């Protein structure tokens, strides 16, 4: 006979919710790293900064208390929002002022022709 | 932008924000339940931790969506070959996506703040504009991409 669910659901410890949130933070940091890697291909400085932001956020998640703790301030969420805005500004700068790929479509770019993108057969 | 949406007007008259409640009772921390009020005022209690975690996960999901838009916009501008006859096509497609990523990050944080305030007050959650903005913008960008491809194909032939 299955156990009856507890009457007071709010009294249950939020263990799995905390773990799911921790995994969501991990996915977000991985997304930061992926965007940093994409920017790294066109601008090394901006890419390194974005990847460093991901590492910084990961460290803040470990250090700062989560907002579910009474009295905790949502500093890390604000940091993430500001970091994404900064990444967007960096990407905007790279998109507007960066050296975009030129040349006709379906033709290898000069960098690819030099063997930077594809290995020579 | 107040935390009380159109659904939340059934209770007593609400102050403009959590600061108003804190201004009335400066000695009481916001995380403690308030005593029985003498007049119409909003009591804020710490919500269930699972709701706070769910709110935080929603914010993180919007953050990842914002990062995906930024990466897509950057890839369009930097990695796509130029459209024949439409040299500005990549920037028209990519830059709005990057700007949309920044907007989603900011609005996502505001949405988290509004949701958390509503949870503390026991009010209905406010409506989110982000899904509508996302749907409209994605549809618009798809239409713009189709037009650019059409122009490019016509010019190429």
Image (spheres, coloured by chain):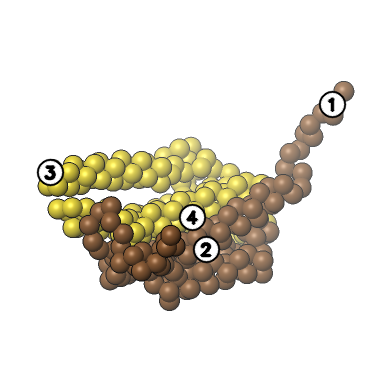
Residue B37 image position (x, y, % from top left)? 61, 50
The numbered dot on residue A2 is 1
Q: What is the secondary structure assignment of the residue under circle 1?
A: loop
Q: Residue furthest front?
A: A121
Residue A80's place in the image compared with B66, above or below, is below
Left or right: where does residue A55 sit relative to residue B72? right
Q: Are marks 1 and 4 in contact (CB under 8 Å)?
A: no
Name the quarter where the C terminus of chain B is drawn: top left
Residue A29's place in the image compared with A52, above or below, is above
- Front in this rendered view, residue B9 or B132: B132
Tag 4 and tag 2 share a subunit = no
Q: Which residue is mark 2?
A: A33
Residue A100's place in the image compared with A20, above or below, is below
Output the letter for the chain in yellow.
B
Precedes in sequence: disc 2 or disc 1: 1
Tag 2 and tag 3 share a subunit = no
Please identify the quarter of the rendering in which residue A28 is found: bottom right
Q: CA distance from mark 1 to mark 4?
A: 40 Å
Q: Residue at x 64, y 53 (%)?
A: A23
Chain of the residue under the numbered disc 3 shown in the image: B
Disc nearest the viewer among 2 and 3: 3
Q: What is the secondary structure assignment of the residue under circle 2?
A: helix
Colour of the chain lettered A: brown
Q: CA distance from mark 4 to mark 2?
A: 13 Å
Q: Residue at x 68, y 59 (%)?
A: A69
Q: Which residue is mark 3?
A: B157
Observer able to see residue B19: no
């Amino acid at each position: 006979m299955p156990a009856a669910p507890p009457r007071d659901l709010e009294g249950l410890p939020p263990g799995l919710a905390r773990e799911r949130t921790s995994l969501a933070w991990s996915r977000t940091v991985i997304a930061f790293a992926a965007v940093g890697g994409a920017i790294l291909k066109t601008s090394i400085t901006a890419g390194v900064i974005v990847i460093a932001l991901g590492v910084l956020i990961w460290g803040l998640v470990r250090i700062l208390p989560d907002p579910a703790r009474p009295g905790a301030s949502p500093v890390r969420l604000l940091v993430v929002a500001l970091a994404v805005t900064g990444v967007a500004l960096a990407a905007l700068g790279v998109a507007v002022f960066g050296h975009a790929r030129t040349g006709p479509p379906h033709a290898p770019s000069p960098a690819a022709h030099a063997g930077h993108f594809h290995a020579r057969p | 932008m107040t935390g009380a949406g159109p659904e939340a007007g059934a209770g007593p008259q609400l102050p403009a924000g959590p600061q108003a409640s804190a201004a009335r009772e400066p000695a009481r921390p916001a995380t403690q339940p308030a005593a029985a009020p003498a007049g119409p005022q909003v009591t804020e209690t710490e919500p269930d931790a699972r709701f706070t975690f769910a709110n935080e996960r929603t914010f993180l999901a919007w953050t990842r969506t914002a990062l995906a838009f930024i990466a897509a916009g950057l890839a369009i501008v930097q990695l796509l070959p130029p459209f024949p006859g439409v040299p500005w096509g990549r920037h028209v497609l990519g830059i709005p996506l990057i700007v949309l990523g920044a907007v989603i990050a900011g609005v996502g944080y505001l949405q988290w703040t509004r949701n958390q305030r509503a949870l503390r007050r026991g009010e209905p959650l406010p409506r989110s504009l982000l899904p509508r903005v996302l749907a409209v913008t994605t549809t618009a960008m798809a239409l713009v991409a189709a037009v650019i491809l059409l122009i490019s194909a016509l010019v190429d032939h």
